[in-house]
Image (cartoon, rainbow, N blue to C red):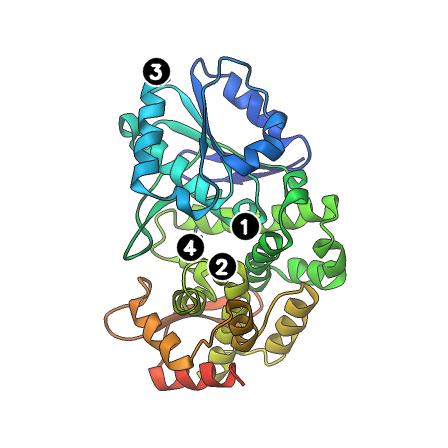
């Protein structure tokens, strides 16, 4: 078992490895009152690994993004109240990023905040969503527009849960792993380069090692900047492009991590265009690694996946809507070299367009 400490105001641990589910059960059984909010599909596949006993109330959430709705959140609060959860109770959140978002937000607001633990069951959630206390709902106007920061009191990630993921969901998680490699140490990049095939095949020990490396990176950035006003924004590397592409493709048409993979390549190209990238070999190295992780590297590949064109001009327009851009122009997180980024690079829209056009050829 690997343990990573997240040093926030109230520090907590991320446990990664076989047996993490049993540790989550131990944690919950230390509380007199507890309840579980779980993604329905994940619970069917892995809920038997979490034996809280017959007295533990359970509410199943609709699978995936449809759970991130006000009506579902309301149902969660009523379930917590009907289960007679008090302020000293513990909520267990089980599932992928969407289930954790809803459960975390339920915990943040029920009785003005109760403790929760996260048991992430997708690669994306294990390397990103479960750590750092971001919780959110979607509105018709956009994703994650309503939410709160509410750190969990423990995160329990068992790589065994990843063996049942659909290939497309696992690949989507790999997009975030690739981002961590660019933000992190030479060690993670080299590990991925030398073991890409085994990771794609979900070899358990290796997967745990990679999840732990990504979790360590995230723990460091969250500890430095829990409210996402500085260092933590490095985690948005590739995301300004990715969110715009997802917006143009339409809801659910391009898996988030695949858009991130292309977003990373575009961020590298833009960093070159803006004379920010110091290591000229990094773009080709990242492209090669993405390909060996079975990830897309061009907008053209994403357009094929979406079954519709993704015109550069529309992607550029969508960037204006991205909540991470500021009033005075387009701002990006751009790589300088492996493990180093410029967090707030302003780049003229015409240069961004040039990079987008090149990625469509
Ligand atoms: N997913 C990015 C963050 O947690 O800040």
Q: Secondary structure at mark 3?
A: loop
Quote the CA–CA distance across marks 1 and 3.
32 Å
Provide residue 230's location: percent of width, then percent of height. 37, 57
Nearer the N terminus, badge 1 or badge 3? 3
Q: Nearer the viewer, mark 3 or mark 4?
A: 3
- What residue is shown with label 1? 124
Residue at 58%, 32% in the rendered image: 44
Specify the label residue 232 is tagged with.
4
- What residue is shown with label 3? 84
Outermost residue, left side: 327
Residue at 44%, 61% in the rendered image: 236
Provide residue 118's location: percent of width, then percent of height. 49, 35
Quarter of image, res 121: top right
Label 2 beta carbon within 8 A of ligand 1 = no
Nearer the N terminus, badge 3 or badge 2? 3
Q: Residues within 10 Å of mark 4 (few under 14, many from 20)?
A: many
Quote the CA–CA distance across marks 3 and 4.
36 Å
Provide residue 321's location: percent of width, then percent of height. 29, 67
Residues at badges 4 and 1 in contact (C-beta under 8 Å)? no
Provide residue 194's location: percent of width, then percent of height. 76, 62
Quote the CA–CA distance across marks 3 and 2.
37 Å
Q: Residues within 10 Å of mark 2 (few under 14, many from 20)?
A: many
- Residue 113 lies, with reference to residue 159, above or below; the image says above
Q: Secondary structure at mark 1?
A: helix
Quote the CA–CA distance across marks 4 and 2.
19 Å
């Amino acid at each position: 078992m690997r343990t990573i400490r997240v040093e926030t105001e109230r520090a907590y641990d991320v446990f990664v490895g076989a047996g993490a589910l049993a540790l989550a059960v131990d944690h919950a059984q230390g509380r007199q009152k507890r309840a579980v909010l779980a993604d329905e599909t994940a619970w069917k596949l892995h809920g038997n690994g979490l034996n809280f006993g017959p007295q533990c109330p359970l509410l199943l959430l609709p699978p995936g993004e449809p759970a991130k709705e006000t009506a579902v959140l309301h149902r969660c609060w009523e379930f917590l109240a009907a289960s007679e959860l008090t302020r000293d109770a513990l909520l267990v959140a089980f599932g992928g990023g969407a289930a954790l978002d809803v459960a975390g937000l339920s915990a943040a607001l029920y009785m003005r905040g109760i403790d929760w633990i996260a048991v992430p069951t997708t690669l994306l959630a294990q390397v990103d969503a479960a750590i750092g206390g971001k919780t959110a709902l979607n509105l018709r106007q956009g994703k994650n527009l309503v939410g709160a920061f509410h750190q969990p009191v423990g995160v329990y990630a068992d790589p065994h849960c990843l063996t049942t993921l659909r290939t497309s969901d696992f690949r989507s998680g790999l997009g975030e792993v690739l981002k961590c490699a660019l933000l992190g140490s030479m060690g993670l990049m080299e590990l991925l380069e030398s073991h890409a095939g085994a990771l794609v095949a979900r070899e358990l020990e290796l997967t745990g090692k990679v999840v732990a490396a990504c979790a360590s990176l995230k723990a460091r950035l969250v500890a430095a900047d829990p409210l996402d006003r500085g260092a933590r924004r490095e985690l948005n590397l590739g995301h300004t492009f990715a969110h715009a592409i997802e917006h143009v493709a339409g809801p659910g048409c391009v898996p988030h991590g695949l858009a991130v993979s292309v977003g990373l390549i575009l961020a590298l190209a833009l960093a070159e265009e803006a004379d920010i990238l110091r290591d000229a070999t990094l773009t080709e190295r990242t492209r090669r690694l993405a390909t060996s992780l079975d990830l897309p590297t061009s907008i053209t590949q994403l357009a094929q996946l979406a079954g519709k064109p993704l015109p550069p001009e529309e992607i550029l327009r969508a960037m204006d809507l991205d909540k991470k851009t500021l009033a005075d122009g387009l701002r990006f997180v751009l790589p300088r070299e492996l493990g180093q980024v410029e967090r707030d690079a302003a780049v003229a829209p015409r240069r961004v367009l040039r990079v987008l056009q090149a990625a469509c050829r």
